[in-house]
Amino acid sequence: MGVAKIATQTSNSLAIGTERDPDPWRIPTDVAMDLVELMARYCDGDAAAFRELYSLVSPRLYGYLVKICRQRALAADLLQLTFLKVHRARGAYVRGADPIPWIYAIAYRTFIDDVRKQKHDVVRLGNDADPEQAAAPDRDERRSEAADSELVSAALSALSRLPHEQRQAVVLTKLEGKTLAEAAEIAGTSVGAMKVRAHRGYKALRSILSYRDASPAATGAPP
Amino acid sequence: MTGRENDELAALRAIELMPPPLTAAIESELAHLSPAAMRRPRRQLALVLAVGGLVVSALLLVLGVRADVDELPTGWIPVVAVGWVIGLVLAAWFALVPRAGTVMPRWRIAALIAIATSCMYVVLGLVLHPSGPSSLIFGRERFVAGHGCLELGLATAITPVVLGAWFLRGTTPVRTRWIAATLGAAGGCVGGLLLHFYCRIADGLHIGLIHGGVVGCAALIAALVVPRAITTRS
C-alpha cells in the first residue's frame, strides 16, 4: 500500500467522532508567542519566567507523559527530569524559536531512556523479575488510577498495550493535537513514517477497544 | 468505531492533570540562575567554516603545497577546492543551523548530506584524477602505503568537529547520530580540502578511496563518538 493511500486513510480514520478542525487542544498562537517570549526571558536569567513556562507547558506535557507511560508517578518523575534537562540545556535554545517541539522531544527521549533502563535493570535482576511486574503500578499508583473515570482508565489501558512508537504517534497526532510534521519532529522520524505509525497504532487501538467491548470479562488483550 | 470507543478516546483527550510542583533539584538551580547565552546557529556556522579554513591554511604553511600544482590542468585546483568547500558548507549548515523558528537541526536533510558527501567524493575521485610529471602513482600494489593521507585528513577533521559538537551540546534529544555524522562529514571535507592541496599522489584509487574516504570515515567516527556530547542530558 502506498504511503499516499495510507495517508488518505489515516486522515479519514483518525478523526475522533466529527471533531477534527479546528483543534481545541492545540496551543493557541498567542500562547505559543508567550512561550517564545518566556523562554527568551528565562535564558536571560529570569527565574520567574521559568516558573511561568512550567505552569503553561507542564499540564499538557504531564498529560502526554501519562498517556505514553500510563503510570502517574513515573510520568511525574519524567516531567521533572525533562525540565531539568531543559534547564541545563537552555543555552541550546535559539532566540525566537518555538520551544514546544524541543521540550516534547526531550520528554520522549527521557521516556525512552527510562524504558531502556527498566529493561536493563530487569535483565540484571534475572529470572526473579518479570518485566510486566516491574512495570506494574504500585499501590499508590493504583489508588490514583482508581480516581480516573472508567472511560479514561479503559482508554489508558488500551493505549498502554500499543508498542511505544505507535502509542506516541497516536498520542501526539490524535490526543495532543499535533500536526504530523510536528509529531515527526518530536519523534525524530519522517512525516511518512509518522503517518504509518499513527495509522497502525489507531487501527490496533480500535481493535483492542472493540474486542474488550465485545467481551467485557476479557482483560483487554487484543484478539 | 463505536460510540463508547469514541467516548473513551475523547475522555482521554480531555484528561486534565495537575502537574507536580518543581523538585528541590530544579528549585536550587533556579535560585542561582544566571543568564545563558542562547545559541546563534549562523554565527556558529561561520566560526566552524573559519576555523576549518584556518586549520587548512596553517597545516599547508607547515607541510607545503603539492609539488605538481603547476602541472595539473588549468583551473583544476581551484575548481576541486570549491567542490570541497561546497561539501563543507552544506554539511556544516545542516548540522548546525535549524529551520527558522525551531531549535533542533534538520536531521533528515543532514543525514542525506552526510550520505551524499561520503559517496560523492569517492566516486568523483575514482573518476577524475588528472596527474602531472611530478605526480606519484601508487596504483593497487602500493595503495596501502597511502594510509598517511587518511590519518592526516582525519586529524585535520578533529578541530571543526570538536568545535561543532561544542556548539551543538544539549540541542538534540533525537537522531543525534545523523547530526553527528553530518558534522563528521563537514570535518572530513576540511580534511579532503587539505589533502587536495597537499598530496601529489594522483591515482584514482588513492584520490577516491583515501581522499574521498576521509569524509565517510570522519562521518562514521563522529556518529559513534559525538552523540554523547550533543544529546540533551540531565
Image (spheres, rainbow, N blue to C red):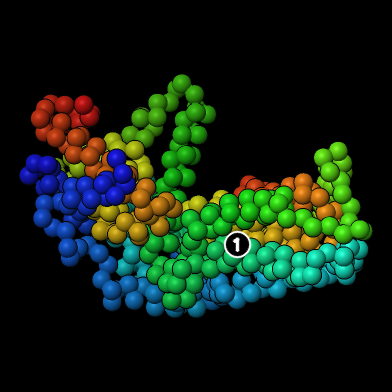
Q: Residue at x 19, y 35 (%)?
A: A207
- Check the picture and name the quadrant holding the N terminus of chain A: top left
Element type at mark 1: helix
Left or right: B132 as drawn, with respect to B121: right
Q: Nearer the viewer, residue B95 or A48?
A: B95
Answer with left or right where residue A187 lies relative to residue A30: right
Chain assignment, label 1: B
| Quarter of image, res A62 | bottom left
Asked if one can make out residue A123 in the rendered structure from this viewpoint, the answer is: yes
Residue A60 in percent (x, y) is at 29, 59
Is B83 drawn above or below residue A68 in the view shown?
below
In this rendered view, identify the residue nearer to me: A142 or B218.
B218
Quadrant position of the C terminus of chain A in the picture: top left
Answer with the quarter of the image where residue A196 lies: top left
Q: Nearer the viewer, residue A21 or B56?
A: B56
Residue at coordinates 37% horizontally, 47% vertically from top-left? A193
- Give the x, y percent position of residue B57: 81, 71
- Residue at position x 45%, y 22% from top? A128
| Residue A29 x %, y % | 28, 74
Res B118 visible: no
Extreme-top residue of the structure? A127
Name the residue at 18% across, 39% down: A206
The amino acid pointed to by label 1 is Ala
**Label 1 packing within 10 angstroms: few (<14), some (14-19), many (20+):** many
- Left or right: where A22 falls relative to A33: left
Q: Residue furthest left?
A: B3
Residue B96 vertical placement versus A132 (above, below): below
**Residue B106 locus on image (x, y percent):** 48, 61
Which residue does the numbered mark 1 point to in the structure image?
A: B91
Number of callouts in the render?
1
**A129 vs B167, nearest the viewer:** B167
In the rendered image of this protein, does residue A93 appear above or below residue A76? below
